[in-house]
Amino acid sequence: MTMTADSCPQCGGAVPVTYGDRVACPYCGSSLVRIVSSSAGPAPPGMGDRRPDPTHPTQEVDSTREAAVTWGVRLRRAVLEDARTRLPVFEWLLPADWECDGTVTWRQSVAVPALVGFRAWNPTGAEQIECLPSIPNTWTESAVTAAFRRFQPRTLPFKLDGLEQRAPMTAREALRQLVVPRYRGRVAAEPGHASTAGRPGWPGRWGGAWSTGLRGLLPPPLVEQRIRQVPGLPAAIDYVKKLAAHGYPSRDVDVHVVEEETLPHLAASLREPAPDAGPAPASDGARVRLRYAFEGTTIEEDLFCVVSSVRTESGSGLLAEAHTHWVAESLFAFRADVGRLDAFARAAMASVRSIRMNAQWFAAYQAESQRIMQERIAMQQALQQMAAIQRASFQRQMHRLSDVSRTISETSDMVMAGYESRSASFDRMSEGWSQAMRGVDAYASPGGGSVELPGGYAHAWTNGLGEYVLTDSSFLNPGAFAPGTWEAMTRR
């Protein structure tokens, strides 16, 4: 006789013997269903139609027969729908008994017009799988700033086209310095190291000073008493706490880094198999394991990150600039009780690899990017038309002055000679004065001659048909969205 124990097909953990046909794996939280093999022989004598005794963790089966009962993973298809486009964003296979929710945030950005967040959790346990919104960044460095790199800040407070201005990081640096502080909490201080800030961009000492000061000014008993006196406010606070039960921990939580590793093949393993998948995936991936207190217990969480970057250069010499666009993406988080994360991570990663993006929604994503770009181009064209009207008005005034000058020149040769002398000097000064007052810059046309265009822009393009595009971005090529052959113009 052979003793056979039932095991979870996802993590390999032992499945408790029960009278039911559906159970949840105590190690990885997977929903399991009991499957009876059709090729199995008759049950051993005495078993009949009875279920195994739940007090016995094993089942006796004749060594000449196949196991009569196995366990299979019970999954369901979860779909995240975008409320704006009314289209599904992606499909995700999750354990059948789990709950899930997600959001799509649209914004005015040509590079990244939408950010997606999604999470699924076990309602009877601590297990959770989460897809955090990506963090797009950009950074420009010139030959001058590179020489003073040690002294300049590595993060700027304002955004460019919805992209945060931050110096490039590796995946491990992005996890510790950017992802964990933003979505989880402050990294607890290690021996010889200072803790990170509770909020991005705020030093830890300021965050602690604020919280300590607030606690001193507002004693908790008095605050709670006043809150209870406001009609309807206590119920609203309890409702918000219930909604956030499976959300992000408080940023006041100290997060301990248990371990971290570099995963150069992470992006490739998460990529959908396709013959025309495009450029090779990034090779800068990492994982960090966290441990922190959550809902009265201590949990562990694996946080994954992939950093993808594109670098371009423009100019030369002291005017050379290097532009780096990089994104902290594939931000997946797997959470479980302490000691059970390793068993749960295998099932969680299999669930993550089942994500399939909806091509129609991605097309709408690209269309929104094009719409924002066309809107900005139309605004530039409107400004160009306004500048053209102003130039025409100024030219009419100059023509009237010219008529008056001709009339005066006919009265006397002496006056004529004096006027010509003054006019030549006036013309030389007028050109520079008019350009400065009208806010225009002169550019050399590719076919010869020059043209005046609205000033203040770093780059100008023309198609030779009287159409121009002005921009500050060195990446914008009008040939990507407008027909014809476009050439860059040189400022005179």
Image (cartoon, rainbow, N blue to C red):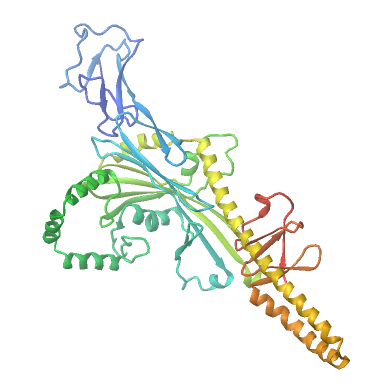
Towards the viewer: 281 or 230: 230
Residue 178 shown left or right of residue 49 in the figure: right
x and y percent of residue 470 in the render? Answer: 64, 62
Residue 399 shown left or right of residue 317 in the figure: right
Quarter holding the N terminus? top left
Q: Which residue is situated farthest in the right direction here? A: 413
x and y percent of residue 106 in the render? Answer: 45, 48
Quarter holding residue 141: bottom right
Q: Is residue 283 shown above or below 10?
A: below
Residue at the image position 24 percent from the left and 37 percent from the top: 125
Q: Which residue is situated farthest in the bottom direction here? A: 414
Residue at the image position 18 percent from the left and 47 percent from the top: 235
Residue at the image position 65 percent from the left and 77 percent from the top: 436
Quarter holding residue 402: bottom right
x and y percent of residue 179 in the render? Answer: 38, 53
Towards the viewer: 426 or 203: 426
Taking the image as drawn, is residue 32 in sight? yes
Towards the viewer: 349 or 248: 248
Quarter holding residue 472: bottom right
x and y percent of residue 226 in the render? Answer: 13, 58
Taking the image as drawn, is residue 117 in sight? no
Quarter holding the C terminus? bottom right
Towards the viewer: 232 or 122: 232
Residue 21 shown left or right of residue 329 in the figure: left
Q: Is residue 470 shown above or below 102?
A: below
Q: Is residue 121 shown above or below 433?
A: above
